[in-house]
Image: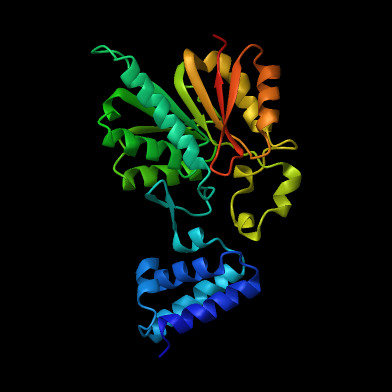
Amino acid sequence: MATVRELLDGGVARLRESGSESARLDAELLLGFALDTDRTAVIAHTDAPVGDGAAARFAALLDRRAAGEPVAYIRGVKEFHGLAFGVDPRALIPRPETELLVQLGELEIVRRLIGTPRPKGAPKLRVIDVGTGSGVVAVTLAVLLRRRGMADDVAIIATDASEDALQLARENAVAHAVGDRIEFDAADLLPGTVTAPWDVVLANLPYVRSAAVPTLPVAASFEPVGALDGGPDGLRIISRLLDQLPAALANDGVALLEIGGDQGAEIQALVEQRLPGWACDVELDLGRLPRVAIVRRAA
């Protein structure tokens, strides 16, 4: 009977041969999944014996990962902002970079609720997550606002052009007990059935340049290409959203748009072209790369 350490060492070697850039992490996560435990327990008990059934499950999981399938799809879960989300090929796997979008969205909402106390009976702050995918932005915001005791002051809508993605987002909302806090709407960008204006617009839309999609790591080939391909310059879909903002954004509203790490100057030029006189600031991520465009009307 093999031990945890022996299976891990063999798994790491197998994944390195297949080209994995995170072979040890992948092997630890997959062995934990095969053992129905977590990575911490795997690391802490390397001398523990592993039964033949679990070893066989681990071998099968390694085969899938060696073929390029993302660990998140294999396990069916991905951690985001301290929360666990169900993931599968219906939607893009959440990226750590998107946590900045959530952080800025939460700050913007809290600033509006605390900075200008809303009179009793005032309409809720209106927030929309455009292109929600697995729902991580909308669901995480709903959870954070619930923790702050502000959930009743905010109305959140999440849209996506994919019905399959919306269903996944609904499942994640229910799993985090915020299914009744978010309205889901099938729409190409902003919904035509819901009256504007929006106070806060958040969007993590496709922004990878079409020519770059085939060069992405093989794991990306398992994800829906429509959630990655942003057109020749990567900003085709974001451009369409910008065109909708004048009619959709409240006078003092803000749009927070995730962008690629090389698109800072391009998004500012695009806003200047599509929305003359509007302001566009770009927030950097932890790697000091452009990550979120903050778009507002002219003062």
Q: What residue occupies the far bottom of the structure in this picture?
A: 1
Left or right of 242? Residue 166 is left
On the image, the x and y values in percent for residue 270 come to: 69, 24
On the image, the x and y values in percent for residue 263 come to: 67, 35
Residue at image position (40%, 70%) is 32
Residue at image position (53%, 36%) is 131
Residue at image position (72%, 52%) is 214
On the image, the x and y values in percent for residue 228 come to: 63, 44
Left or right of 173? Residue 90 is right
In this view of the protein, can residue 80 be seen by the observer?
A: yes
Name which quarter of the figure residue 77 lies in: bottom left
- Which sits in the foreground, 128 or 217? 217
- Image quarter where the C terminus lies is top right
Residue at image position (47%, 76%) is 58
Name which quarter of the figure residue 185 lies in: top left
Q: Is residue 271 above or below residue 62?
A: above
- Which sits in the foreground, 89 or 294? 294
Q: Is residue 35 above or below residue 162?
A: below
On the image, the x and y values in percent for residue 237 come to: 64, 32
In this view of the protein, can residue 38 be seen by the observer?
A: no
